[in-house]
Amino acid sequence: MTLIRRILPLLLALLLLFPAAAGATVAQRIGEERADWPELNEEGFLDEGEFVYEGESEGLWRYVSPTLKIEIIRKTTDTPKKLVWWEAEVWTRGDERWFNPTFKEGKHLSTSTWPYLLAQQHKVVFAINNDYAQGRYPNKNTSVGIVIREGKILWSKVRKKQKAGAFPNQDILAFMPDGSIAVHDRLEYTAQEYLDMGCQTVMCFGPWLIRDGQINETALKVLGKNNNPRTVLGMVDSHHYVAIVAEGRTARSKGTNLTFLTERLLDKGCTVGFNLDGGETSFMMFMGVQLNVAGGASNKYGNARRATELIAIGVSDQVIERKPQVIKK
């Protein structure tokens, strides 16, 4: 144990120094060897209780319970430009599923507030931002694409033609009954067909990045080059997910493109990948605290744009009310 304590700071330093080469397997190995972290069972979870680690200074966060494990690593690079991003791996067990907490229960896309307040209100362990629909409901005349929440079709109007290079392209992220996620072209299925598949939640933004392990090369040629704050969600299998948030429009991070994030998802073993809303909307939340700074935000805390709901997983009583810290512009 003494040797481990001595070499751990060096391992963490190397992890932050060489972000592209350091994968979640490194974080997992460090986590399971740390003397002050609990031993996990053969399935990689706790037998009982919860463990929370918030290592802002070293860029490492962890949550483990009998049904959920989350590991987040902050990565940085200065070439070819300054960039800070967070890679989160989520492992689930049993009935753990993604869900969409709202300010008022059951009233999706209606009332907005700061994302960290939503996360704290619902005691959410981990969350990222959602799709393009928030702030536009219930304007039924807006062509947002197919949007479904809790089995209710909120929008079904899809653009027949897509302007080259315009975001979003209205591709689909569908949350399947078995806990997996699926991605589709915007005109591939109707809203009713998604319901017939058993989907209770369907999000619309895009483009989809990876499907069946194959890159969406056509979309990336048109939409994959611009550098901005971004959020992507991927899946290795129906119990293993990857979420990445890239900070942008700040002094320390200029943002990145979808091609870079698609490569990161592939490095993690994702067979499915999807681009969610970005810009000032983009955020990653852990235990009620926003990890990234929303570039371009007018508020003094760097909070992401007000949200009507989250893409969330895990609930814990250890999530408490905490105000964000003032950031230096």
Image (spheres, rainbow, N blue to C red):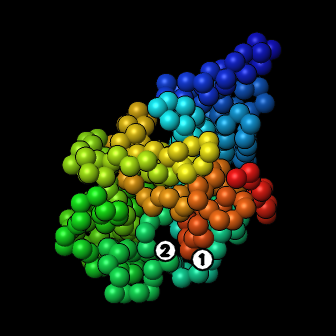
Return the mark for residue 21.
none
Query: Residue 120 or 256: which is nearer the viewer?
Result: 256
Q: Earlier in the sequence, mark 2 or mark 1?
A: 1
Q: Where residue 255 appears, x then y in whole percent? A: 50, 46
* Image quadrant assignment for residue 146: bottom left
Q: Is residue 192 above or below residue 16?
A: below
Which residue is painted at 58% across and 59% down in the image? 296
Could you tell me if residue 85 is visible in this image? no
Label 1 neighbour load within 10 Å: few <14, some 14-19, many 20+: some
Label 2 neighbour load within 10 Å: few <14, some 14-19, many 20+: some
Report if the CB atoms under discs 2 and 1 are less than 8 Å apart. Answer: yes
Which residue is painted at 21% across and 49% down in the image? 218
Q: Is residue 208 above or below residue 131?
A: above
Q: Is residue 300 left or right of residue 144?
A: right
Which secondary structure, mark 1?
loop
Number of dots carrying numbers: 2
Residue picked out by circle 2: 134
Q: Where residue 96 appears, x then y in whole percent? A: 54, 56
Could you tell me if residue 114 is visible in this image? yes
Q: Where residue 63 appears, x then y in whole percent? A: 66, 45
Q: Where residue 81 appears, x then y in whole percent? A: 50, 35
Which secondary structure, mark 2?
loop
Q: Is residue 142 above or below residue 86?
A: below
Residue picked out by circle 1: 112
Tag 1: residue type? Ser
Which residue is painted at 45% across and 61% down in the image? 277
Q: Is residue 209 left or right of residue 49?
A: left
Which residue is painted at 62% across and 28% down in the image? 16
